[in-house]
Image: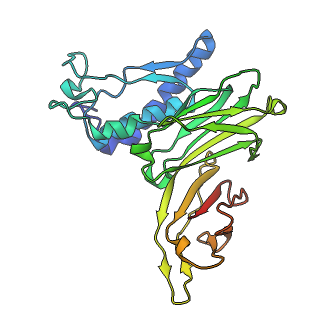
């Protein structure tokens, strides 16, 4: 199928199906043998859209099985055993980083967890808002934080929103250390939360333009589609510029395409949170 050395873009769904089957089989092997699941040597392709989908399709399945992975490879050496030639690494022949590979490989993930992971997934697709979501069972006997890696420059250029929940409710006891770029250290300090399910959700901010009226009100139009993927529990974070220019209270109502209200907010209540709309929530910041 890869006669040219590149997985054809027209066959990306076929390739994804292969990754699904391959990863599932190896996951069963790891379970049967009682060993960790670790994938290596994948994605030997060039700086193309088809290569992006090839790498992403594999990495998504690795996430689905909570498997570790190592990309092949950092730098091309003309390996005659692969089809990617000198461009199969992170750099092209002139030493420039390959953009599509950066997009595919700079996935948000938890690389240390204060407990036992149960699920983890990163949505690279633009319509999924670069959302990262992970669940784990809290172990408060671990005196170390959960560490979340995320590439701010690549996927969160306007900033990010972190949502923390325990058993589906907003957490009041988790602490967050954001002193290091591209890393968040999250720690549960309440011993009573031991054994409960923690949910970590990271999504990028969306900057939305508004229309000002003579009465100095502002109208913001934004359409939110129902998202069918049940893994998404928090997907949108809004940053609305110019609100500080308006006098008095400024109210916002965020509605879905069917007219249902997601949430309401005003200048003195910078966020609103709801879990009542089709298994996902919306947050809104007014600045």
Given residues 281 and 64, the one toward you in this image is 281
Residue at screen point 64% across, 62% down? 270
Q: Is residue 154 above or below residue 92?
A: below
Q: Is residue 249 above or below residue 41?
A: below
Residue 127 visible? The answer is: yes
Q: Residue drawn 46% across and 36% down?
A: 107
Residue projecting furthest to the right: 192
Check the image and name the residue furthest to the bottom: 214
User: Can you tell which quarter of the image residue 154 is in?
Assistant: top left
Q: Position of residue 199 (x, y in %)?
A: 68, 40
Looking at the image, residue 130 sits to the left or right of residue 93; the answer is right
Q: Position of residue 110 (x, y in %)?
A: 56, 31
Quadrant housing the C terminus: bottom right
Q: Is residue 15 left or right of residue 238?
A: left
Q: Quadrant of residue 92?
A: top left
| Residue drawn at x 24%, y 16% as measured from the top left | 81
Instruction: Tell me where residue 146 sits by quadrant.
Output: top right
Question: Closer to the camera, 228 or 181?
Answer: 181
Q: Is residue 105 left or right of residue 147?
A: left
Tell me what residue is drawn at x 45 percent, y 32 percent: 59
Rendered-image quadrant of the N terminus: top left
**Where is residue 267 shown, x and y percent of the image?**
64, 69
Instruction: Tell me if residue 15 can be seen.
Output: no
């Amino acid at each position: 199928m890869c006669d040219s050395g590149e997985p054809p873009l027209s066959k990306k769904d076929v390739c994804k199906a292969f990754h699904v089957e391959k990863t599932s089989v190896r996951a069963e092997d790891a379970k049967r043998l009682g060993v960790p699941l670790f994938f290596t040597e994948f994605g030997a392709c060039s700086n193309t859209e088809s290569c992006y989908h090839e790498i992403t399709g594999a990495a998504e399945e690795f996430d689905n099985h909570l498997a570790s992975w190592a990309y092949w490879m950092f730098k091309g050496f003309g390996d005659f055993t692969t089809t990617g030639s000198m461009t199969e690494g992170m750099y092209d022949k002139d030493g420039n980083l390959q953009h599509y590979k950066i997009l595919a490989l700079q996935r948000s993930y938890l690389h240390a967890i204060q407990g036992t992971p149960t699920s983890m997934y990163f949505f690279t697709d633009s319509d999924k808002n670069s959302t990262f979501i992970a669940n784990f069972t809290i172990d408060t006997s671990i005196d170390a934080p959960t560490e979340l890696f995320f590439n701010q420059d690549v996927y969160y250029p306007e900033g990010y929103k972190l949502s923390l929940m325990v058993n589906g409710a907003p957490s009041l006891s988790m602490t967050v250390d954001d002193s290091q770029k591209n890393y968040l250290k999250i720690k549960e300090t309440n011993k009573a939360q031991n054994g409960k399910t923690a949910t970590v959700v990271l999504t990028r901010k969306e900057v939305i333009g508004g229309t000002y009226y003579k009465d100095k009100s502002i109208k913001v139009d934004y359409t939110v589609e129902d998202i069918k993927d049940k893994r998404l529990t928090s997907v949108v974070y809004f940053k609305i510029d110019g609100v500080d220019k308006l006098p008095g209270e400024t109210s916002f109502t965020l509605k879905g395409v069917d007219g249902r209200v997601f949430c309401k907010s005003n200048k003195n209540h910078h966020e609103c949170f709801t879990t009542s709309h089709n298994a996902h929530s919306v947050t809104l910041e007014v600045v």
